[in-house]
Amino acid sequence: MKRQRITAPTGMHDILPDMQPYYKKVYKALEDIADFYDFQKIDTPIVEQLELFEKGTGSSTDVVQKQMYSFKTKGGDTLALRPEFTPGICRSYIEHGMFNLPQPVKVWFYGPLFRYERPQAGRYRQFNQCGFEIIGDENPVIDAQVIQIFYNLLKELKFKNLMIEINSIGDNQCRPYYKKSLANYFKYREAQLCSDCRRRLKENPLRILDCKEEKCQRIKSQAPQMIDYLCEGCKSHFKKVLEFLDELELPYHLNPFLVRGLDYYTKTVFEIFEDSKGTEGVNLNSALVGGGRYDALIKVLFGKDTPACGGAAGVERIVESLKEKIKGFSVSNPKFFLAQLGTMAKRKSLRLIEELRVEKIKIAETLGRDSLKTQLRTAGRIGVDYALILGQREALEDTIIIRNMATGKQDTVKLNKAVAEIKKRIK
Ligand code: HAM
């Protein structure tokens, strides 16, 4: 019979212990930045009502049409594993009456998301995102600050050559005119579009601009640009965002075809890329960060008309790049190793370890072992300063040997004085 192997689900991955320091580093940088800019942490459920994403993310988006993990519960509810945070956070804002708090409400988040995508480098079916949302402020300075915060987060993580792609996709006033003009343009070229884009043409021609198919990209390069259709309000908003970015000296590139794949955006949209080989080298398929303004979303979710802006970073994508930059982490090895022999010594060792834990003194051990020789070899390999030896005789006499690993000098001390003696040896 063929031996079966059970593996992680396609597109999902374990984060093994050797990778944890990278994730920890990202989390720490995120926490520090969030604290500095005065954001509060929010956690929302991993599953939400499917309707939240259909309404919020948008039913014409690839995320909702192709990438949702949705299911019926035993009670008959239709839920979905969250493919993004923003609609859940807006739902929470409405549900908990956060509009009664001083505005804007500034929250940050971190956690796993699920998208049924074709797995490839930097694209997973389960991945982590972190990000910031500022809800309740329409000022363009907020858009610039959100971009700056992500830029700073990446800078803190030693990213160089970052490039911000930015565009405005207008609002419900001006976008319909643009969509019409775009639909006309693509209708004329419908036969040359991929089958997905022919469907997109009917549902939402903006989505064609997102298509990664080469033939569609070629056609889109001549398409009308939103910037020429912006109403006065959106134009002035965008101009101010760019002026603030200039003030902050952030490097940006106006990308007239950046529309983002989610339905709720209004006005500013942006993505941040790492450009390792000069502008030509920017890999436009794998943004580290994506975000923008979404002034209409909270109303779509039956809340009050509330402007908002935010963004999210892909943690795996950041970590993959960090791995290239940081080749290893220094770990603080324990300075002590406890070697023991026999059942009585093991019992006393357990108690001593607890006493040391209370004193926050880190100690290495291999309690399951019995050979003192093997244990001392392990102590040598770890590179501890002292070995504490509790053999059968010491266990009987209630003593312990403290051996200086560098000099070989040994002191036998009473077990009840061991912690005090160990403390003396901490430089
Ligand atoms: P998004 O562009 O769909 O935006 O995702 C943001 C980031 O998450 C991407 O730039 C990428 O780094 C990462 N990401 C997305 N999909 C995957 C995947 N399959 N595997 C690995 N990483 C991925 C949003 O989700 C919006 N909610 C962002 C936002 C917040 N807009 C306003 N507020």
Image (tube, rainbow, N blue to C red):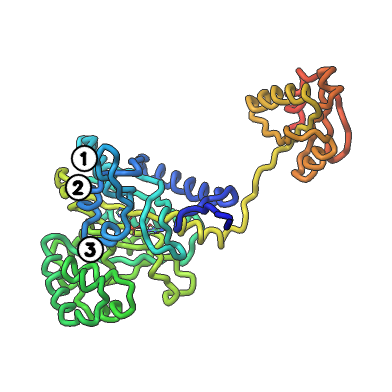
- Is residue 4 found left or right of 93 in the rendered image? right
- Determine crowd level at label 3: few under 14, some 14-19, many 20+ residues with C-alpha closer than 10 A: many
Name the residue rendered at 37%, 61% in the picture.
117
- Determine crowd level at label 2: few under 14, some 14-19, many 20+ residues with C-alpha closer than 10 A: many
Answer whether labels 1 and 3 touch (C-beta < 8 Å). Answer: no
- Is residue 17 found left or right of 334 in the rendered image? left
Q: Is residue 195 above or below residue 321?
A: below
Counting every numbered tag in the picture gives 3
Toward the viewer: 41 or 149? 41
Q: Which structural element holds mark 2?
A: helix
Toward the viewer: 422 or 261? 261
Amino acid carrying label 1: it is Ile
x, y (%) of residue 79? 28, 45
Amino acid carrying label 3: it is Phe
Q: Is residue 83 above or below residue 97?
A: below
Q: Quadrant of residue 397?
A: top right
Q: Is residue 68 above or below residue 400?
A: below
Q: Which structural element holds mark 3?
A: helix
Q: Which structural element holds mark 1?
A: helix
x, y (%) of residue 238? 23, 63
Looking at the rendered image, the quarter that the N terminus falls into is bottom right
- Determine crowd level at label 1: few under 14, some 14-19, many 20+ residues with C-alpha closer than 10 A: some
Answer whether labels 3 and 2 touch (C-beta < 8 Å). Answer: no
Residue at label 1? Answer: 94
Residue at label 2? Answer: 298
